[in-house]
Image: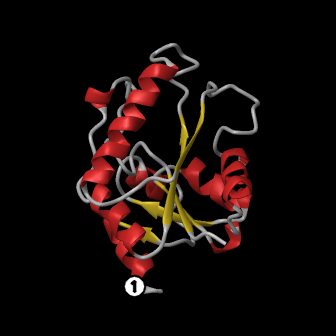
Amino acid sequence: MSKFVLLDRDGVINQDSHDFIKSPDEWRPLDGSLEAIALLNQHGYQIAVITNQSGLARGLFDEAALTQIHAKMRQLVAGHGGKITAIYYCPHGADSTCGCRKPKPGLLLQCAADYQIKLSETVMIGDSYRDLQAGIAAGAKPVLVKTGNGKQTLTEHPNLNIPVFDNLYDAAKHLVSRQ
């Protein structure tokens, strides 16, 4: 049974943008996020990225651009001694009734099936309420980071009874300290 940590992408690993991340040049890692992934890897965790990418449905970028963005992310993570095992994304728009767009749990369930992950023992780290909802719906343990939309999520949902960290590196340090 593999140990995984599931990560949202925009606002958790990289800087988010209201204009969407449309090219590799626009993809910029948040301070400490690449080191956080490497730290988790060093302690036996594999990483899967679970991300909504409605910019595809909106025609803001295409699959080739998304592949290039993810190649840059993987390359920069590797440069810090880390590895992303898998990336799952929903290409549908916000009004879609698909099962893969967070807050629905489809992508997490697909990842769990592909890698025989026990979601009840798996952390889902996100910055938006829909990340937390998807984690809960899939039976995973939700964790909020204050980067990206995290502070706004806390303001809108002040009674969240889940772990909250300043950023991905702090969350990673906490996870590895509990092993």
Q: State the image coordinates of residue 134 (x, y, percent, origin top left).
A: 65, 52
Residue 111 relative to residue 85: left or right: right
Pinpoint residue 30: horizontal percent, then vertical percent.
Answer: 27, 50
Is 34 on the left-hand or right-hand side of 5? Answer: left
Which quadrant: the N terminus? bottom right
Q: Which residue is mark 1?
A: 177
Q: Residue furthest top?
A: 59
Residue 38 found in image quarter: bottom left
Left-right relation of 24 to 95:
left
Visible residue check, residue 37: yes
Numbered disc total: 1
Q: Nearer the viewer, residue 83 or 14?
A: 83
10 vs 157, nearest the viewer: 10
Q: Is residue 79 above or below residue 39?
A: above
Q: Is residue 52 above or below residue 124?
A: above
Q: Give how far across and how far down residue 16 sits, in percent.
A: 36, 39
| Displayed quadrant of residue 42 | bottom left
Residue type highlighted by circle 1 = Ser
Question: Which residue is pictured at 25% across the width and 52% down the height?
Answer: 79
Q: Residue at x 41, y 42 (%)?
A: 10
Q: Assign a secondary structure to mark 1.
A: helix
Which scheme is used to colour this image of the protein?
A: secondary structure
Mark 1 crowd level (few <14, some 14–19, many ≥20, 10 Å Cα): few
- Find residue 39 and report its horizontal and vertical position in percent: 34, 69
For the point 58% across and 19% down, the residue is 57
| Residue 160 visible in this rendered orientation of the protein | no
Residue at point 35% right, 76% down? Answer: 173
